[in-house]
C-alpha cells in the first residue's frame, strides 16, 4: 500500500474509532470494536483519486484511544493512538506525531474531516454541535450525507459531495 494511502486510511479509520461513543470507559479499559472500512476520495485538480480499504480494531473515544488497521490478509498496516492534544501514527516506517486527529487527517488528505461529529454519526444520530436536516435514509450535517438505511445490518455510509467528493463505507462486525 502506498504510504499516503496508509496515512489516509489511518486518518479516516481514526474517525471510525469513535464508534465507541463519548461515554465509554478509559481507552485502556474500553472493549474493542472491529469491522471493515473503505474510503474513496475523488480526484481534485492535480490530486489523483484515492481508494483504500482495511479491517480495523479500535477502542476508546474521541478523547483517547487506539486504532489498528490490517490488510485483508491480516498484516498490520498502521496503528494510530491519541490523547488530548496529541495523535500518533505508526505506519511501519516510524511514528509521526500530530496535534490532533484533525491534524492527522489534514496531513493525510490535505483537509481536515469533521471528527467531532463521527461518534454520533456512527451511533446513528446527528451531532449536537451543528444543525442538521432529516433525510429519508438518515440526515445531512456539515456538508455530509449520513446514510443509516442499512445500520441494522451493520452498514453506515457517509458521503460528501463538495470537491473532492468523499465516500466512506463502514461495516461493523457487531452493530451497537
Image (spheres, helix red, strand yellow):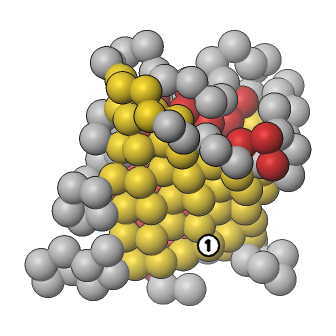
Q: Position of residue 89 (x, y in %)?
A: 53, 56
Left or right: where does residue 76 sit relative to residue 82? Answer: right
Q: Nearer the viewer, residue 55 or 127?
A: 127
The image shows a total of numbered marks equal to: 1
Tell me if I can see residue 126 in this picture.
yes
Tell me if I can see residue 7 in this picture.
no
Quarter of the image for the N terminus: give it. Answer: bottom right
Q: Residue at x 54, y 41 (%)?
A: 137
Q: Residue at x 74, y 18 (%)?
A: 24
Q: Position of residue 12 (x, y in %)?
A: 50, 55
Residue bearing mark 1: 53
Q: Position of residue 15 (x, y in %)?
A: 53, 44
Q: Residue at x 73, y 56 (%)?
A: 171
> Relative to 139, is 92 above or below?
below
Q: Nearer the viewer, residue 109 or 164?
A: 164
Q: Within 10 angstroms of label 1, few (less than 14), some, or many (20 or more) residues?
A: many
Displayed quadrant of residue 26: top right
Q: Residue at x 81, y 49 (%)?
A: 153
| Outermost left residue | 45
Q: Secondary structure at mark 1?
A: strand
Q: Nearer the viewer, residue 37 or 27?
A: 37
Left or right: where does residue 69 sit relative to residue 118? Answer: right
| Outermost front residue | 136
Q: Position of residue 43 (x, y in %)?
A: 26, 79
Left or right: where does residue 122 sit relative to residue 32? Answer: left
Quarter of the image for the C terminus: give it. Answer: top right
Amino acid at each position: 500500500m502506498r504510504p499516503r494511502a496508509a496515512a489516509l486510511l489511518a486518518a479516516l479509520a481514526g474517525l471510525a474509532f469513535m464508534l465507541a461513543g463519548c461515554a465509554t470507559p478509559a481507552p485502556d479499559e474500553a472493549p474493542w470494536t472491529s469491522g471493515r472500512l473503505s474510503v474513496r476520495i475523488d480526484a481534485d485538480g492535480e490530486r489523483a483519486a484515492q481508494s483504500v480499504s482495511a479491517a480495523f480494531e479500535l477502542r476508546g473515544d474521541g478523547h483517547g484511544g487506539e486504532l489498528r488497521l490490517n490488510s485483508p490478509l491480516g498484516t498490520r498496516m498502521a496503528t494510530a493512538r491519541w490523547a488530548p492534544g496529541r495523535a500518533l501514527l505508526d505506519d511501519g516506517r516510524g511514528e509521526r506525531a500530530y496535534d490532533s486527529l484533525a491534524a492527522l487527517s489534514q496531513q493525510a488528505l490535505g483537509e481536515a474531516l469533521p471528527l467531532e461529529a463521527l461518534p454520533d454519526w456512527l451511533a446513528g444520530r446527528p451531532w449536537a454541535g451543528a444543525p442538521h436536516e432529516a433525510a429519508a435514509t438518515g440526515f445531512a450535517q456539515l456538508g455530509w450525507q449520513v446514510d443509516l438505511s442499512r445500520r441494522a445490518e451493520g452498514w453506515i455510509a457517509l458521503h460528501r459531495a463538495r470537491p473532492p467528493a468523499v465516500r466512506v463505507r463502514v461495516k461493523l462486525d457487531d452493530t451497537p
